Image: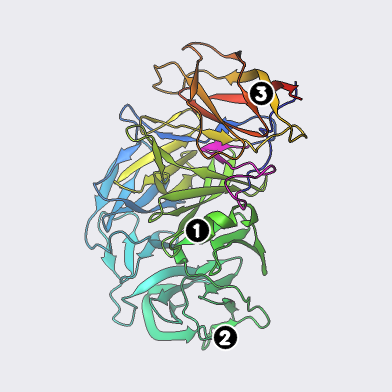
Amino acid sequence: MPDLPLNQKPYTNVPDIGNTVAIQGFIDADKDDFMNNTFRHGLGGNTNNYFANISSKKIDGIFDIINYGFAAVFSGGRLYKVTEDGTATEITGVTINTGIMVSFADFGDVGFFCNNSAILKWTYADSTCSFIADTDAPTDAIFLGFLNQYLIALKANSQRFEFADVGDPDKWLGEGYIAESRPDLAVCLFSAFGEILIPGTKTLENWADSGDPTSPFQRIPGTITERGSLSPYSFAQVDNSYFFIDSDRRVIRLAGRDPQVISNPFDNEFQSLSSVADAIGFHFNAEGSTKYVITFPDAQKTFAYDYKLDFWSEWSYWNHTTGTRSDYIGRTGCFIPKWNKYIVGSNATGKLYIASREYSKDEGTDIIPEIITSRVDWGSQNRKASSKLRIKIERGTNGVLDTDAPKIYFAKRDDGKKQWSRDREIDLGIAGDTYSYATFRQLGTYRDRQYRFRMQGAISTISRATEEIEAIT
């Protein structure tokens, strides 16, 4: 009885029919190793299935205030202080734009924020915030960074970045530089690894502290990278690399000066999108799982890349009324070390969630992980009869707040057909850690076949599936 190919990497750059090699995909199922398939982390919190409910507006930024043990969160243009117990307190004073991702720079006891706006300043000990008062400070800042005691701001729709006086973020000199190695628009700015990275639509530039207080920054010679982006909010710093989607709609890992294309298995997915300009990327880092997550809100698609395993999957939100998927409900996320929690912000409301494998639901709604196998023909294009399919199921205990018995459904499609058969249900019962087996007989004849497994309820996974076939002469 040969094993079904459940543990291969997904690959989508092939036609949906006629392919005999590629797995079509993993949806809401992570491959933490090549032996066991597991749910992705669910999103929950208290008895209301969330950690905090801030407002009715989507979350535009979550930031760890390292020295103080709380988070700064933006929703509806307003700034909130969120503590470990989920209490949210509005920091009153001024507001910034709604619906645009926020950039943040931390200056120890003071934080600075912008999103195509004036620069908002919050002294963490205060209950109010304000804009930087200096009239020379930019009023259209889209990204902020700190480098060697300089607060730096990129101006919107330009190639220009400006900076405050050294050690004094409140004092601006009206001075700046033009990132002009090519005549392309600068789309974002980041400061890390002792440098400033300025991506444009066609190039990436690296700048550094020149050591000259009268002209403190200079482009680093020989570091221009011929790789641009039209998706400023797709950039995320993950460990020692930047991840983003470039202007050719390929996902790039920038390690040092070396841009590496990592999206080859999923390029067809990104190329088929109507637009990538709205992409939002963030570092997901919960309970040992570390991934680059990128969402395309207009297309309602979310993808996750496990860079340690070089493994792509799709994340989604399952609509139980329509039986369809949309994008993952997390718009952004942040690990708060002092809480030892990874917090995710909603793409539709002002709710925050804790990401954890304890949850098999997203805000009370079942996650429906899905694995679709490659088309298998067992080395022959002759017709064969499936006399027995035996499925081994690793059964976990119910997740937090789960009361229903978990279920697994499987369907099949044969010989290049696009229509799936009806789902067959496997009810696993409510209690206990256990292994389960399910056997199905006389599943028809085919030349090549594809299987789809969907899982609902407590964390239960298909660890092995074998098929007994008979050749038809």
Q: Nearer the viewer, residue 231 or 388?
A: 388
Circle 2 — which element? loop
Circle 1 — which element? loop
The overriding secondary structure of the stretch rendered in magenta is loop
Where does the N terminus fall, quadrant-wise?
top right
Is the C-beta separation of discs 1 and 3 under 8 Å? no
Q: Nearer the viewer, residue 290 or 367?
A: 367
Q: Is residue 1 above or below residue 374?
A: above
Is the C-beta separation of discs 2 and 1 under 8 Å? no
Residue 289, image x, y percentages: 58, 40
Q: Is residue 276 above or below residue 54?
A: below
Label 1 packing within 10 angstroms: few (<14), some (14-19), many (20+): few
The residue at 57%/85% (across/down) is 181
Circle on res. 465? 3
Residue 64, image x, y percentages: 44, 51
Q: Is residue 382 above or below residue 262?
A: above
Can you identify the residue that label 2 sits on? Answer: 181
Circle 3 — which element? strand
Q: Is residue 317 above or below residue 444?
A: below
Can you identify the residue that label 1 sits on? Answer: 272
The residues tagged by marks 1 and 3 sit, at their Cα atoms, a distance apart of 33 Å
**Which portion, as a residue range, is magenta?**
12-31
Residue 194, image x, y percentages: 60, 69
The residues tagged by marks 2 and 1 sit, at their Cα atoms, a distance apart of 31 Å
Write down the quadrant of residue 203 in the picture.
Answer: bottom right
Q: Is residue 386 left or right of residue 216?
A: right
Q: Tell me which label, 2 or 3, sits earlier in the chain.
A: 2
Type of amino acid at the residue the image marks with label 3: Ala
